[in-house]
Image (tube, grey):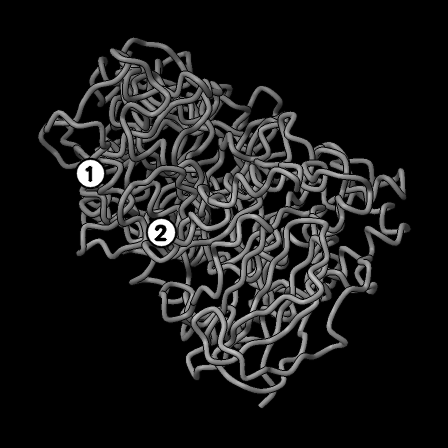
Amino acid sequence: MKTTASVEDVFRIIYTEHHDPYTVLGIHRISLRKKPSVAVRAFLPAVVQAWVVREGENGARVETVMERVHAEGFFEAVFKGESDVFPYMLKTVGYDEEERVFHDSYAFLPQLTDFDLHLFNEGNHYKIYNKLGAHYVEINGIGGIEFAVWAPNARSVSVIGSFNNWDRRMHAMRVLGGSGVWEIFIPGLDAGELYKFEIKSKDGYVLDKTDPFAAAMEVRPRTASLTHRSYHTWDDAAWMKQRRGTDAANTPMSIYEVHLGSWRRPEKHNPEHALFGGVTYRGMAPQLAAYVKEMGYTHIELLPIMEHPFDGSWGYQVTGYYAPSSRFGSPDDFRWFIDFMHREGIGVILDWVPAHFPKDQHALGRFDGTALFEHADPRKGEHMDWGTFIFNYGRNEVRNFLIANALYWIDEFHIDGLRIDAVASLLYLDYSRKEGEWIPNEFGGRENLEAINFLRQLNWAVRVNHPGAIVIAEESTSFTGVTHPADSNGLGFDFKWNMGWMHDMLEYFQKDPLFRRYHHNNLTFGLLYAFTEQFLLPISHDEVVHGKGSLIGKMPGDYWQRFANMRAFLGFMYAHPGKKLLFMGQEFGQWNEWNHDDELDWNLLAFDAHRQLQTWVKDLNTLYRNEPALFEIDTSWQGFAWIDLHDANHSMLSFERVARNGERVVVVCNFTPTVHEHYRLGVSEPGVYRELLNSDSEFYGGSGVGNGGAASTDDVPHHDRQQSLLLRVPPLGVLFLKRND
């Protein structure tokens, strides 16, 4: 074998064992018999003959035959007496006799800078998604795809894809110093190419992996990554400007939680649209926006839209953290969806899952043959209940991967907020573990200090880089300071799901009204801690799955009482301090438990009771958005005052919500089917109080008990107030009252 390269290097190239094939392949200055020369080497399997093509005098093309050094396809051409490297292309003829002329990948310098690699290795490169993955770039006027992947424990890494017949020998990558990042530029590629990274582990095992930073994926069940270029032009500048100046804590936030694949399914009405129920980002946006606007919601929250292989995971088993699910269209289709929502005045929140990831062989697990993204020790690295891996939050690059991912959705897709799933599982090392199945932290405690630091850094990064965007924690424990600033020993979230309130309310409302007097504490207990965090009141998808039935199905009583209880429950929810979230279908009283494989039971709106309940929710949203007392001071006792919290015998509550300017909305709740004809209620100010809303109105399907639209105060002290109203309080009803100015 006659070559200017070392024989060892040639064989390492042939068997894809070389950590830096650029030192062997491409163009190199050499010394031949002590004279300067230049050698061009290429490894071209399945090629019969190869030439080096360069520009000669007067622009003429000069072709130099390359010698076949090894039968496997190692070629070399030596240019004796030349001392400078030069631009060139390769020309090949394969066994199919097809001639190709192309730029050589190994003629290009790395595109990642030392500073990029330094920031990534220390965990602070918040736009690393622009560097790792697959990106279209132009180098010296030559366009192509730059591939880069982090695999520090790999023996070698190659890009395989539709463009090289999935042959790992064709495009072996180089590792950039000690960064663990492998890189290659492949000229001539553009958007729409399928690819993976083929990784040879230290032990010699070959793994085919999807790109952790892939911007797009092919449609499941296929698992390849897809090169992508965005051409979307945003048209939501007014929304984004307004968002930057918004203080979410003091503005109304009523969220409609949506599983995009089962809200409506066009396949039900047009069999030609059978693929994924006919749901597409572009097709669903106008319908969903129109409905959300009509219902008065401020935001939608989408169950995870990141790529996932199993429909039944609802998106909570993510394999493509940077790729919107290809089920419903391209990444630009999803950008269009969000753009449309913003133009319609609707915010978009995404569920985001940094607490765990699935063990699918093509994805993140054991990515380079070692526990790279996850902890090696299963006592810290696996969720036994869920059969998933846990991220290694103490590893800089893993933390960077996740924080950059959160910022990616806000930056590249204009997402207005993220709801982080299963925060409790991040915070505690013993989460869902028995004695001996977990490792204490360095101080002997159960708190996951690495995950806590990750959350603090995440929330800081979002706040600094994207003012106005919010991060919400689904956190089910009594961990202190979830929404407190990090510099006050908090986690820095904007809002926390009030899981305690949700459990107390569902437990209370499932009771027969006859026995509710014994559970009055369920209603009042939440106010003991209501202002310790910035809370969001959730009735989410979790409450209507896995045999839990629907929300209206939890209500006791006959048909009429179920709907009355439902109206009363939702009325109390909207009156209570805290932002609101309601899962789709509950707004019109779907009886069936949610099924991700079918659309909601929209046919129920043909029945009066369901249509009237939907109208009640619509009017609650309208009242909530129009009355500052219901949202302006959500996180302080200054915005709330009890009138009577002790009337357990009648299962009644009354309180005031207060706006910054002192305006008050009075709320009276009766959670039994008994009408109170002469109920005296103390109020702070004299005057005529009009009924803003009455859940028992016949308009909503109620019995029509009320106060004729208004009631006047009497100079009769009551409830520690100098004035009072004499009211007719409806059965299983909620009244919203406000004094006329």
Does the rendering let one see residue 520? Answer: yes
Identify the secondary structure beneath mark 2.
loop
Gap in angstroms between the C-alphas marked 2 and 1: 83 Å
Identify the secondary structure beneath mark 1.
loop
Q: Tag on residue 81?
A: 1
Q: What residue sits 19% from the left and 38% below the top? A: 81
Spot occupied by residue 125 in the image (x, y as percentages of width and height)? 26, 49
Spot occupied by residue 230 in the image (x, y as percentages of width and height)? 54, 55
Q: Nearer the viewer, mark 2 or mark 1?
A: 2
Does the rendering let one see residue 55? Answer: no
Quarter that holds the C terminus: bottom right
Which one is nearer the viewer's eye here, 368 or 651?
Answer: 651
Spot occupied by residue 126 in the image (x, y as percentages of width and height)? 30, 52
Nearer-N-terminus badge (2/1): 1
Which one is nearer the viewer's eye here, 60 or 207?
Answer: 207
Lateral position of residue 351 relative to residue 449, left or right: right
User: Given the image, on which type of amino acid does mark 1 rest?
Assistant: Gly
Task: Name the image quarter holding residue 140.
Answer: bottom left
Q: Tag on residue 529?
A: 2
